[in-house]
Structures are given as C-alpha cells and as structure tokens.
Image (tube, rainbow, N blue to C red):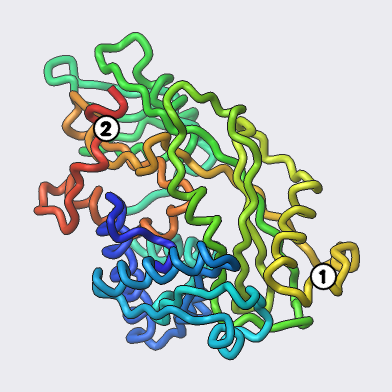
Amino acid sequence: MVHKNPGSQTWELTKRSHQLWKRLAETIRDQGMDPLQVLGWKRTGSLLVGRTPGDSMMLRERVRQLSEAGLTAEYLSSNELLSVEPALLVGSDGGAAFVPGDCQLDALRTVAYIEKVNRSFTLEGRYAEFYHEPVTGLERSTSSGKVEAIRTSNNTLYGKAVVVAAGCWSRSLMHDLFGGSNVKLDVLVKPRKGHLLVLENFNSLQLNHGLMEVGYVDYENAILPSGLNDQSQTLSVSMTATMDTMGNLILGSSRQFAGFSTEVEDSIILHIWKRAGDFIPKLKELSLKNFMKNRKVRVGLRPYMPDGKPVIGHVPGLSNMFLATGHEGGGLSMALGTAEMVVDMVLGNPPHVDNSPFAAQGRCC
C-alpha cells in the first residue's frame, strides 16, 4: 500500500483487496495451515525510498496522505532507515515512507493454492478446468442476444455468465469474438513487458522489508498521452527488492513496450542489477556473472491501460458478459477485490467498492 495514492480511483479497490488477502491468510491459519508456507505470506512492511531532498519532500507528503487515509505510516530519515534496513543506503538527503502493515505473498504458491481449493468442488459439478483450449467463438441467443455458451477448440461450454480476463490478450480476443457483430468495443489494453531477476539462496545480505524507489511510483502512475504510440516510450527501470520465503533475492523492475515479446534481454537484467546496486551497496561488491547458475529471470507482459486503471464491468449491450483486465503492475494488489467486484456484478449484489470508475462504457466504446 505504501506506493499507492489515496487520491487515485484504484485506491478503494486496492484497500479492499488488501483486506481480503489478510482475511484469506487468517482463514488458512484458522484451518491449521501456515500462510507463510501456503501463500508465501509475510507481514514484512514496505519501504518507499528516495535519495534526494525532493524525494524526501514527496515521501513526507505520502506519509501524510496515507495516515489521513487510515493507514499506519511513518517517515524515516536516512539514519532511522539504516537502523531498520542496514543493507540499504540512501544518503544524508534521503529517507523513506514506511508502512509496517504491508504484506507480501508468492504469486506461484498462491495460484497453486487457489487451484487446489477450486478442484475440491469438482465432484460437486461446480468446477472444471479447460486449460490449453483456446476460445474460438460465442453462441448468442437469437432473441435476446445474450451469450449462452462459448466454443473452445474442443468443447462448447454453457453458462449463465462469461468473464473475459485474458490480460493483455483481452483486446484481440474481444475483436475475434465480436468482429462483424453489433457489439462495438475496443479494449485498449496493451502488453507492457517486465523483467524480474531472481537470485536463489542468496546469503550475501539480508533484507527485512519490501523495498521500492520513488521512481517506481512515477512510472506506475504515468498515463500514455493521447496520440503517443508504444514505441515512443523508452525503457524504464526502477529499483524494487525483496527476499521471499525461500531466501531468494528478487530484484526489479523494468517496464517497456515491446509488443508481445517475452524474450529475456540481458542488457535489461544488467540495468536492473546496477540500479539495485545504487541503493544496496553490497551488490556493487559482487559480480552478476557469479550467479549465473543460481539465477532465474522472470519475464511477463503486464496488461496496461492508457488511462491507468483496469476495466471491470459489463460488456456494453451484453448483460451477462463481463470484462476484468488492465491492472498492469497492480494485478496482485487488486486481485481479490476485482474477483469480489465481478461476483457482485454477476449475482446482482450491492458492490463493496464503487465500480463506476472501471466501467467499459465511455472508455472502450
């Protein structure tokens, strides 16, 4: 939450998701399991750090905003920061915004757990998986126009509601499904490539919190100006760092528009390493070449929306078809709130969070 803006339209959704993640961790604990092992869940707190007087002014203001929004937050001077995170160095002009209640989780473990729970409903006929079966079309009622089924490469699946949550592929999928129809929709989501560097069993230093530099917030909140194409935006790299439950050091983070390419770019990995070294001096004493056997690189495509917020809601003109895409770097932090929002829409329940800012109407049609 430390890098989120309380004045943004995604704030309430992010806050609600944070509550739901904590509730899930508590439920797992109540069932006799350890959220640390099941989800990689750790209440480490997070630090948003800066190195200049301007950064420090911004961080003090961020602490004020977060505190007014009901979070426990405090500003740490460079000396105070050194006492809680000795491996981090920001210089005498630097400082940090600290939110002790922030948590982290392991996305791979979490997805595996959710899949396992879902599969427990298979025998009741309430859950089925159709992985690796691309959607090829829709079947719609000739009278009402409602979607009655989706066709895949191997099956026709009937249901009362359809949710399109295909990330950065949502735009092309919707074009394929509705091309030539009376549904006029253009979901402007596009892929934004990112690299993460994972150094396994890293014991050269210890990090106690999730770390992020203020530059990450600037790029996360950036909105692509009208008329500016993807290639106009150059590569950006901002320092993020954390240690997971396995003792792996995870460094990031890059952003670039490179189409749908997921190729690892060594120059970007080197850039991430050098940027991390600007904040964590111990890394400058080490050579990345020494970790070739114990490193992994994660490359993914974030679903980016030009106006900086996801699309969550009805497909205009179709009461039983919904969109949930465009979360970019906030996918995990908004995941459970998004799921709850979609469920409330499908069931006709009162929303827990105002969903009007995320509607497709006026943004995609």
Task: Specify whether residue 125 is in view.
Answer: no
List x then y, in percent, for residue 196: 66, 56
Which corner quadrant holds the N terminus? bottom left
Q: Residue at x 32, y 71 (%)?
A: 64
Amino acid type indicated by mark 2:
Ala
Q: Quadrant of the C terminus?
A: top left
Give the quadrant of residue 202. Answer: bottom right
- On screen, residue 178 versus residue 212, left or right, reads left
| Residue 211 image position (x, y, % from top left) | 56, 71
**Residue 264 in view (yes/no):** yes
Q: In this view of the protein, which residue sits in the foreground, 347 or 351?
A: 351
Cα separation between marks 1 and 2: 47 Å
Indicate which disc residue 284 carries: 1
Q: Secondary structure at mark 2?
A: loop
Q: Is residue 198 left or right of residue 348?
A: right
The residue indicated by pointer 2 is 360
Mark 2 crowdedness (10 Å alpha carbons): few <14, some 14-19, many ≥20? many
Count of numbered badges drawn on the protein: 2
